[in-house]
Image (spheres, rainbow, N blue to C red):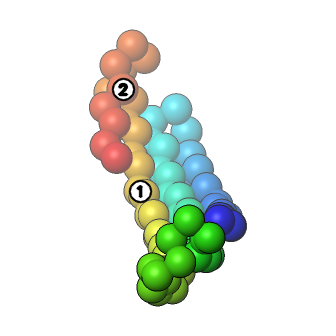
Amino acid sequence: NKDTVHSVGAKLDWQAIENKLKLGAAYFLSDGLSEIEVQSTAFVPLATVAPVPDGREITHNAKLTVAYNVTDAVTAKLG
């Protein structure tokens, strides 16, 4: 069996209003591949061995965030 995963991502935060409003954005990409080789053995001489298909998964993740300082002690967050 052979598994391969490649991942990359980026995140950006921006203080839109000093000490009041902070905005953020993030994006992540993951590309995975799983290869399985099936072989017959001497213990099962009459068995038919069918190849197993490779599994591939591509995942995209995006996220937006907002943080608003209502007061010095209270922050409302979304995302």
The disc placed on residue 64 is 1
- Judging depth in this view, the residue of 22 and 17 nearest the camera is 22
From this view, report whether residue 58 is shown above or below residue 1. Answer: below
From this view, report whether residue 76 is shown above or below residue 30. Answer: above
From this view, report whether residue 8 is shown above or below residue 18. Answer: below
Q: Which residue is mark 2?
A: 75
Which amino acid type is shown beneath numbered disc 2? Thr
- Judging depth in this view, the residue of 13 and 8 nearest the camera is 8
Asked if residue 21 shows in the view, the reply is: yes
Q: Decide: few, some or many residues near mark 2? Use Cα within 10 Å; few <14, some 14-19, many ≥20.
A: few
Total numbered badges shown on the rendered structure: 2
Tell me which residue sits at (46%, 82%) in the image: 46
Asked if residue 58 shows in the view, the reply is: no
From this view, report whether residue 50 is shown above or below residue 26. Answer: below
Q: Position of residue 56 (x, y in %)?
A: 51, 77
Tell me which residue sits at (48%, 44%) in the image: 22
The disc placed on residue 21 is none
Mark 1 against mark 2, which lies toward the viewer?
A: 1
Q: Position of residue 48 (x, y in %)?
A: 45, 85
Find numbered disc 2 in the image and state the secondary structure of the residue it sits on.
Answer: strand
- Judging depth in this view, the residue of 3 and 44 nearest the camera is 44
Q: Quadrant of the N terminus?
A: bottom right
